[in-house]
Amino acid sequence: MTQYSYAEQAHTHLGPNVVDVRTFFKETGLFTYDPGFTSTASCSSAITYIDGDKGELLYRGYDISYLATQKTYLDVCYLLLNEALPTPEELVDFDHELRKRSFIHEGLKDLFNAFPDRAHPMAVMASAVSALSTFYFEHLSVDTKKEALTMALRIIAKIPTLAAFTHRRMFGIPYVYPDLNRSFTENFLYMMRAYPGQNLAIRPVEIKALDTIFTLHADHEQNASTSTVRAVASTGAHPYAALSAGINALWGRAHGGANESVIAQLELIGSVENIDTFIAKAKDPKDPFKLMGFGHRVYKNFDPRAKILKALLDQLKDELGVNNDLLKIAERIEHIALNDAYFIQRHLYPNIDFYSGLILTALKIPKPLFTIIFVIGRSVGWVTQWIELQNDPEKKITRPRQRYIGVEAKV
């Protein structure tokens, strides 16, 4: 049997080495079996690095705490796309370019109007992003860096507008167009809240809170939705079709829908007096109840994004007007999880979803739209991953193997 050695990279790198098994089947007649891909790298990437044991998250080498507290979401978008933080002049140009591209084709209104009132916003959003491919069909062939950047800017700029239109269709209220005089995050809140012709003021504290959430969600390595984007993109599909697939993957409650579930569960618990009952249910191996917002597939010590949002929540809870009843329940559950041996031994620490839902509730964003906020933040990560895949000389169509456990041929 061939001895498989650790693959060495040409440059200094973080994280574990890898065993290159591309020729394993050819040389041994065996497949590796890895449900959930817990030990399998599907690609090489220079975008995001995670050390789950240390609770470390880097975008292009920059620590997430630095980016979330010292930079804006647009700084992060520029960094992911261009591999460097922008100068003040570059940031101004980048911002202006996104503002110009934030309007959507008028024909998309007919698409929104065709959906029933009770359509889930993630279904509407996925359809709208997929429909963009019919208006920008030229993006099916992106051959140069300039063309790739144009495609990326277009999707990043338009997704907040599509999200706001999705919200307004859900409630049957008039659509509000982007305001070119407003910044990226402020403009989204304006399109969500304003009425036509209204000069609505958005508080800086609200802009800061939501901008931080966008930054923390910008990318997160090869998670389920990003892997989906890459898998669909590997077929040569339109990039917006790949992003639409990512939105559908993100919809799941085990992925992007978790923060909505956190708030629903806090509301279900109802009061601090009921917490012990639900904690007992969470510990009972015979009870299917799970405490939402705790633990993470990758982070085994703490979620660095959760630490940032916790600090932001503590700083802004009074100014934002966070629901005191929900906050009291959340703070008590958090205290138990951080001190109870059951949670500590199982690495069930509060994750980003536990805190983001409280902040989004304070921003008066309806629960069904929580995952839409995730989509806005993650759009830059998805499109950056798409670009990286196109430039990968080892790119191949995604085609996992399977372990067949069915019957033998019957004839």
Image (spheres, rainbow, N blue to C red):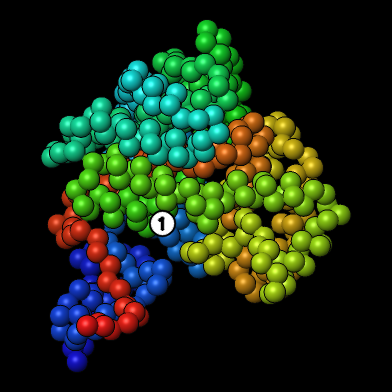
Q: Quadrant of the rendered structure where residue 14 is?
A: bottom left
**Nearer to us in this view, 359 or 139:** 139
Residue at coordinates 17% horizontally, 32% vertically from top-left? 138
Left or right: 374, with 408 as reference point: right
Q: Indicate the quadrant containing the C terminus: top left, top right, bottom left or bottom right.
A: bottom left
Spot occupied by residue 96 in the image (x, y as percentages of width and height): 34, 21
Q: Is residue 384 visible?
A: no
Residue name at image x 55 percent, y 37 percent:
369
80 sits to left or right of 218: left
Quadrant in which the N terminus is drawn: bottom left
Whether residue 392 sits left or right of residue 210 in the image: it is left
Residue 41 point in image, percent of width and height:
31, 67
Q: Identify the residue under disc 1.
A: 224
Does the rendering let one see residue 148?
yes
Q: Nearer the viewer, residue 341 or 291?
A: 291
Give the image location of residue 382, x and y in percent: 35, 45
Which residue is rendered at x = 37% and y = 75% of the image? 34
Vertical order, 198 against 264 (above or below) = above
Badge 1 marks a residue whose secondary structure is helix
Residue lying at 20% horizontally and 80% vertically, measured from the top left: 24
